[in-house]
């Protein structure tokens, strides 16, 4: 009786599964409702996803607590942005966030702009889901919370494409007589929209009209917003920078849009008045700080300043030598 050796190799035709499961970021698991992912139409899923977004945002603030302003400012909106690009987009238009970061297993160690992009993108997914389920929802309280949170985060990140649609929708649709916003939040959101109109969009007529209508409708009042609008109208950089130093982080971030605009008349006034002056005074007049926001080298590059630095002094022009 002969013994035959069994054939070598695999007996099963099933493929070998040597790949480990991919570790997905909790904020990337959900997709857009507009692209067919309907999971965020469920109210419980919306609540859970919102809690995850808030937790990630708190983690971001904790990780970058030493220099939080720089971390928020690190999100690039678009290359070569000029002042004319700051107007509101037409319906159906959008400007993308920064390019998507590589999807790897170590996504939790992402850089500040990647983390901000992830948070803002997740908030957009959630807002789509809430909007898609608004017809079946009896109370807009969650929608109000989400939009208020989205507005605050996007303002700090200087991403107007995210906060402006939320502002308009929150104040025109979600705030109603049946479900009004708290008075403090109503005043806060109205201030942001007024400043966006008056600084970024450079539409002072609309800004003053909104302030007047808000005073008539619900008694809106904000002295610091009044001071900012007056400074913008009159190019009063002293009041502008002084007010910027005392307002909270959200209003200070809104004034970012007008900082470049107000620097130009400051430099023109200094150039026409002085032949030489103190370096720190120029920086405080053009940036509102002693150089912490913008150094002399950055100011020269940004505004194409042709003045010569001589230690702590700046030579604006030399006296003409008479023959």
Image: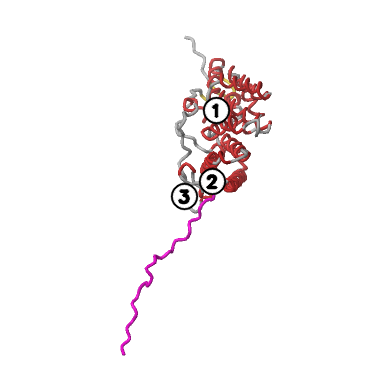
Q: Earlier in the sequence, mark 3 or mark 1?
A: 3
The N terminus is located in which quarter?
A: bottom left
Disc sitting over residue 257 in the figure? 1
How crowded is the residue under tag 3: few (<14 C-alpha within 10 Å), some, or many (20+)?
few
List x then y, in percent, for residue 98: 47, 39
* Circle 1: element type: helix
Magenta segment: does it hold 4? yes
Q: Is residue 317 left or right of residue 152?
A: left
**Magenta-drawn segment:** 1-27
Q: Is residue 8 above or below residue 103?
A: below
Colour setting? secondary structure
Where, by quadrant of the figure, is residue 130 drawn? top right
Mark 2 and mark 1 residues within 8 Å of each other at the beta carbon: no
Q: Nearer the viewer, mark 2 or mark 3?
A: 2
| Dominant secondary-structure state across the stretch colored magenta | loop
Magenta segment: does it hold 319? no
Can you identify the residue that label 2 sits on?
40
Where, by quadrant of the figure, is residue 3 drawn? bottom left
How crowded is the residue under tag 1: few (<14 C-alpha within 10 Å), some, or many (20+)?
many
| Distance between the alpha carbons at the discs numbered 3 and 1 | 32 Å
Q: Earlier in the sequence, mark 2 or mark 3?
A: 2
Question: Would you say residue 120 is visible in this rendering?
Answer: no
Mark 3 and mark 1 residues within 8 Å of each other at the beta carbon: no
Instruction: Give me the residue at 33% from left, 77% from top.
Output: 7
Disc sitting over residue 314 in the figure? none
Q: Is residue 104 above or below residue 79?
A: below
Q: Which of 168/253 is in front?
A: 168
List x then y, in percent, for residue 131: 54, 38
List x then y, in percent, for residue 306: 48, 23
Disc sitting over residue 103 in the figure? 3
């Amino acid at each position: 009786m002969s013994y035959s050796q069994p054939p070598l190799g695999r007996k099963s035709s099933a493929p070998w599964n040597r790949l480990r499961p991919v570790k997905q970021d909790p904020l990337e698991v959900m997709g857009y409702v507009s692209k067919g992912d309907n999971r965020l139409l469920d109210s419980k899923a919306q609540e859970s996803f919102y809690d995850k977004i808030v937790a990630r945002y708190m983690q971001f603030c904790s990780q970058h607590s030493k220099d939080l302003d720089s971390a928020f400012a690190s999100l690039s909106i678009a290359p070569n942005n000029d002042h004319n690009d700051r107007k509101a987009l037409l319906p159906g238009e959008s400007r993308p966030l920064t390019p998507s970061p590589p999807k790897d297993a170590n996504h939790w160690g992402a850089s500040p702009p990647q983390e901000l992009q992830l948070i803002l993108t997740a908030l957009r997914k959630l807002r789509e889901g809430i909007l898609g389920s608004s017809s079946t929802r009896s109370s807009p309280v969650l929608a109000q919370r989400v939009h208020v949170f989205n507005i605050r985060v996007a303002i700090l990140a200087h991403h107007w494409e995210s906060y402006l649609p939320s502002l308009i929708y929150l104040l025109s649709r979600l705030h109603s007589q049946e479900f009004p916003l708290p008075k403090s939040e109503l005043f806060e959101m109205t201030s942001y929209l007024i400043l966006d109109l008056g600084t970024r969009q450079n539409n002072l007529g609309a800004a003053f009209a909104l302030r007047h209508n808000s005073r008539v409708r619900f008694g809106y009042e904000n002295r610091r917003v009044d001071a900012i609008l007056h400074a913008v109208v009159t190019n009063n950089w002293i009041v502008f920078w002084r007010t910027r130093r005392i307002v909270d982080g959200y209003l200070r971030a809104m004034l970012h849009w007008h900082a470049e605009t107000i620097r130009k008349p400051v430099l023109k006034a200094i150039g026409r008045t002085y032949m030489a002056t103190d370096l720190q005074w120029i920086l405080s007049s053009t940036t509102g700080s002693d150089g912490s926001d913008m150094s002399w080298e950055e100011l020269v590059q940004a505004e194409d300043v042709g003045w010569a630095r001589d230690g702590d002094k700046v030579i604006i022009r030399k006296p003409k030598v008479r023959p």
